Image (tube, rainbow, N blue to C red):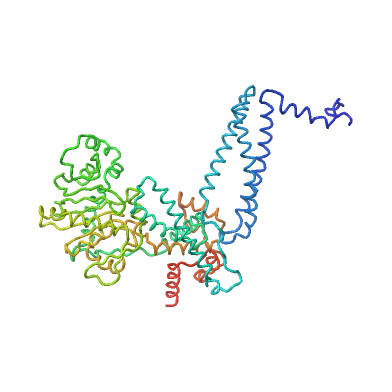
Amino acid sequence: MPGIVVFGRRWGIASDDFVFPGSFELFFDCNGRGVLHSYLVGLLVVLALIILSLCAIVYVSAQGTITNPGPRRSIPALVYLRALLYIPELVWACLGAFWVSDDSKGCDPATVGAVITAVIASWIILLFTALGVVFVFDPLGNPRPQPAAMEPLGVRDMESNEGNQFLSTARSLAVKVWESRLRLLCCCLPQDESHRAAFSSIAQLVSGFFSDTDLVPSDIAAGLALLHQEQDKMEQSRDPDVVVDHSPSSPIGEDLETELEKAAHCMKFAAAAYGWPLYIYSNLLTGPCKLSGDCCRSRAAEYDIVGGDHLGCHFSSILHSTGLQYRDFIYVSFHNQIYEIPFYVALDHKREAVLVAVRGTLSLRDVLTDLSAECENLPIEGVSGACYAHKGMCQAASYIYKKLVNDGILNQAFSIAPEYKLVVTGHSLGAGTASLLAILLRNSFPTLQCYAFSPPGGLLSKALADYSKDFVVSVVLGKDLVPRLSIPNMEDLKRRILKIVSNCNKPKYRILLQGCWYELFGGDPDDFPTEMDDRREEELSQPLLGEESLMIRHSSSYQSLALFAVQIYLH
């Protein structure tokens, strides 16, 4: 071929003669330099392909809405393409690591540093990708049998024997998966019979909650963001709440201010039951100094009544928080196991009361007690109707009841102060347990009073709730989540999430971005429309095909909620 003409003159080399000299320069110009050039060229090619695939994935993923995945039908193919590109990315990361460790001598240090940075970045991306795959992996992700699209709704709801068998197998697998997750999460706890029973109970509860929907965690997050804005809209438009001047469970003649004063006094004891963690948190500057001397000094014989508090820090913080003297305490225990929570018994001379304070959630064992939310029978003499209570708290209350009555702790307290009345108090888990303990003790102590701060929702059946109105005072602060947390409320929340994401015409990424902005910086919720613009309000109250498409099967609680809604609509 004729010589190439460049820079205005003919050269003694043709345009197809650059293969060999170019290759020589790439691989053999200096020690390690050729490998460096090859690595950089390959890296640029791989990165270009990755960037193109990611741009396509981002663009397509941003189309449609949560319940309209049609515009995103090409996402699986793009994901397959991106997965294939992980192979050359991994190979190049390995080659780069090998070159940096072995053949980088004799090359420009700045270039070597850039390659090292690229190699480290590649491995970090691969690591986070692997973690992301583990995080989004669904052990129950086998394809679920879907009903025929053209069949009537009533026909679709009729499950065949094969469908029932599939659902039964899926439920069993889901329970096993959640049991494994709980055992892994609680690997530091002993795997005895009581813990295994708790794991099984909690797994059955958790696995069945969203098993009847086709929602992913990001759908739930988007639904919660939309619900928060909708609730803020409703709260801004409604009239102020009516404030009553008398508590239903307070004695006749006492006003709300007096009742609140008593509650504030008891709250001091309920908070003290948490021991040194809450005391340090509440007194960041002075707390450590006050407790350091008490925790480090040698144990005296007087502390023998304190169980499960090896250094004495818990008991010392209780002394500082309550202002009581050591002689005022009858029994103090920080023994903590599942269904066995810490509590203490003291003489409150200011209010002339024998006070039982129960600690709230502070350990992983307490969390397991909280999550054991099945119903347990709690028959009470003189109470008609179904008597059920939260299983975990019911067993915790029975544990404390046996300690107080069978071990003679209350007899000892009232032998010292026979004219005093009995008061039970607690916060959160301690509030629920204290309420049930008060119910168990009520027949033996008719003048008993209980002050429950943020007791969990779904604690009692209606019969027990009505029975406890005369002696249990519940105090809830603002929008505290715990008193509103119950299985019926969670089912109602699920129904609301399904409805609101079905009505939303925005892509998910916009919902999440606007929701994060709203949570962090506030603003007017009216700036974030969440419902289809062309829908009338009465249409939004009707059953939605979008909502129906998110349901795999209707749970019994969902069906009962739907029936309840229909009854309200008809009446």
Measuring from the top left, give residue 319's x and y in whole percent.
20, 44
Image quadrant for the C terminus?
A: bottom left
Image quadrant for the N terminus?
A: top right
In the image, residue 115 above or below residue 67: above
Measuring from the top left, give residue 364's x and y in whole percent.
35, 49
In the image, residue 378 above or below residue 268: below
Measuring from the top left, give residue 558's x and y in whole percent.
45, 67
| Residue appearing at x 32%, y 65% in the figure | 242
Looking at the picture, tell me which residue is in the foreground, 55 or 234.
55
Looking at the picture, tell me which residue is in the foreground, 246 or 336.
336
To which quarter of the image does residue 209 belong? bottom left
Please indicate whether residue 419 sits to the left or right of residue 176 in the image: left
Looking at the picture, tell me which residue is in the foreground, 417 or 6.
417
Residue at the extreme top: 106
Measuring from the top left, give residue 461's x and y in whole percent.
31, 67
Please indicate whether residue 45 sits to the left or right of residue 469 in the image: right
Q: Is residue 165 visible?
A: yes
Please indicate whether residue 13 sits to the left or right of residue 93 in the image: right
In this rendering, the count of numbered labels is 0
